[in-house]
């Protein structure tokens, strides 16, 4: 085995971790894969023999890449974040694909990714690298070009926002019961049953793309229950799935996936619903298990 082949093998051993870092940082699988590829290219430009800790070096590099991507995204972003839904990771209801387990470690649900999206790039980097991957503040401070104390404050501020907006995950079987009851009530057109299943402050995000009016942010049980009555349409098939490790569904019409929905459930009630209806993004999600 040549030195280049050995280095490529060592990089592949780190690929899962690097994708996990980038997915949490960017909320987009396509951008995460781009960041991983850029990390590999940068590794090829240095003398790998001088790197004492390859895993740490790669984590630092991909952190810098993601930080730059986030800053660039913030600078050019014109569309509002209201209603934005990150890229979901979808698995069959029977269990999570082994390739997705690293990506979804630490209960990386859509609700968490949405909160991360609201953080500043620096806050997001500090929280993700330290709280999720155990990178020391001294190393993160070097990436951010700030003091360790300032970096620690960034992570602390992000931590408060994350913990305040993401309830702990409930039992998966209970989640499925609530989701099934939600769609049964919607099919039956029962507003009373729907409202009973929803937290009074439930939040619905519906993301069909970046065009004007394609993203919707809705709050309150009555409003969300009313919007759910669309599922009385019998031409829409509701297929159970795991969305970012939690109970969710894929909605199809004439066999074509048109919406991916993830649910956040706390104490037996739905507190958040995230629906991705952007067909271009849905086309990039692996839904091959639906054909089995």
Image (cartoon, grey):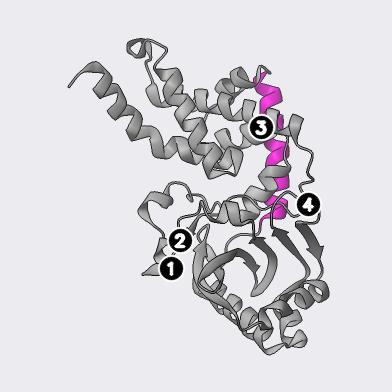
Whether the magenta-drawn stretch holds residue 232 is answered as: no
Question: Between 88 and 104, which is closer to the camera in this rendering?
Answer: 88
> Which residue position is annotated with label 1?
290
> Which residue position is annotated with label 4?
82
Q: Does the image show residue 268?
A: yes
Q: Determine the secondary structure under disc 3.
A: helix
What percent of the width, then of the height, locates residue 129? 56, 33
Magenta: main secondary structure equals helix
Q: Which mark is residue 70?
A: 3
Dot 2, how many residues are within 10 Å of its Cα: few (below 14), some (14-19), or many (20+)?
some
Using the numbered discs, state the Cα–Cα distance from disc 4 to disc 2 in whole angstroms.
Answer: 26 Å
Q: Determine the secondary structure under disc 4.
A: loop
Using the numbered discs, state the Cα–Cα distance from disc 2 to disc 1 in whole angstroms.
Answer: 6 Å
Tell me if 94 is positioned left or right of 90 in this view: left
Residue contact at pointers 1 and 3, CB within 8 angstroms:
no
Using the numbered discs, state the Cα–Cα distance from disc 3 to disc 2 in whole angstroms.
Answer: 28 Å
**The N terminus sits in image quarter:** top left
Dot 1, how many residues are within 10 Å of its Cα: few (below 14), some (14-19), or many (20+)?
some
What percent of the width, then of the height, locates residue 125? 62, 32
Label located before the other in sequence (4 or 2): 4
Q: Residue at x 53, y 63 (%)?
A: 246
What percent of the width, then of the height, locates residue 75? 76, 29
Residue contact at pointers 2 and 1, CB within 8 angstroms:
yes
Label located before the other in sequence (3 or 4): 3
Tell me if 164 is positioned left or right of 181 in this view: right
Quarter where residue 205 is shown = bottom right
Using the numbered discs, state the Cα–Cα distance from disc 1 to disc 3 in whole angstroms.
Answer: 33 Å
Question: Between 252 and 20, which is closer to the camera in this rendering?
Answer: 252
Q: Between label 3 and label 2, give the one nearer the viewer.
A: 2
Using the numbered discs, state the Cα–Cα distance from disc 4 to disc 1 in whole angstroms.
Answer: 30 Å
Stretch in magenta: 147-166
> Which residue position is annotated with label 2?
287
């Amino acid at each position: 085995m040549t030195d280049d082949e050995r280095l490529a093998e060592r990089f592949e051993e780190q690929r899962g971790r690097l994708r996990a870092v980038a997915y949490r940082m960017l909320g987009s699988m396509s951008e995460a894969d781009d960041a991983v590829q850029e990390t590999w290219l940068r590794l090829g430009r240095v003398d790998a023999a001088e790197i004492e800790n390859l895993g740490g070096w790669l984590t630092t590099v991909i952190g810098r890449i993601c930080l730059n991507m986030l800053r660039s995204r913030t600078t050019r972003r014109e569309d509002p974040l209201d209603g934005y839904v990150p890229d979901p990771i979808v698995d069959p209801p029977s269990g999570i694909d082994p390739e997705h387990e690293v990506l979804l470690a630490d209960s990386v649900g859509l609700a968490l990714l949405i909160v991360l999206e609201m953080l500043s790039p620096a806050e997001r980097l500090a929280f993700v690298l330290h709280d999720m991957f155990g990178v020391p503040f001294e190393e993160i401070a070097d990436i951010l070009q700030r003091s360790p104390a300032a970096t620690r404050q960034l992570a602390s501020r992000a931590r408060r926002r994350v913990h305040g907006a993401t309830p702990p995950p409930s039992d998966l079987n209970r989640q499925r019961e609530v989701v099934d009851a939600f769609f049964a009530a919607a099919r039956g057109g029962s507003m009373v049953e729907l409202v009973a299943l929803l937290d009074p402050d439930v939040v619905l995000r519906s993301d069909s793309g970046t065009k004007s009016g394609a993203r919707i942010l809705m709050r309150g049980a009555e409003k969300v229950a009313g919007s759910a009555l669309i599922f009385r349409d019998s031409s829409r098939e509701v297929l159970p799935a795991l969305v970012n490790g939690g109970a969710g569904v894929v909605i199809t019409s004439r066999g074509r996936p048109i919406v991916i929905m993830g649910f956040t459930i706390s104490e037996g009630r739905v507190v958040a619903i995230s629906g991705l209806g952007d067909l271009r993004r849905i086309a990039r999600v692996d839904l091959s298990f639906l054909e089995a």
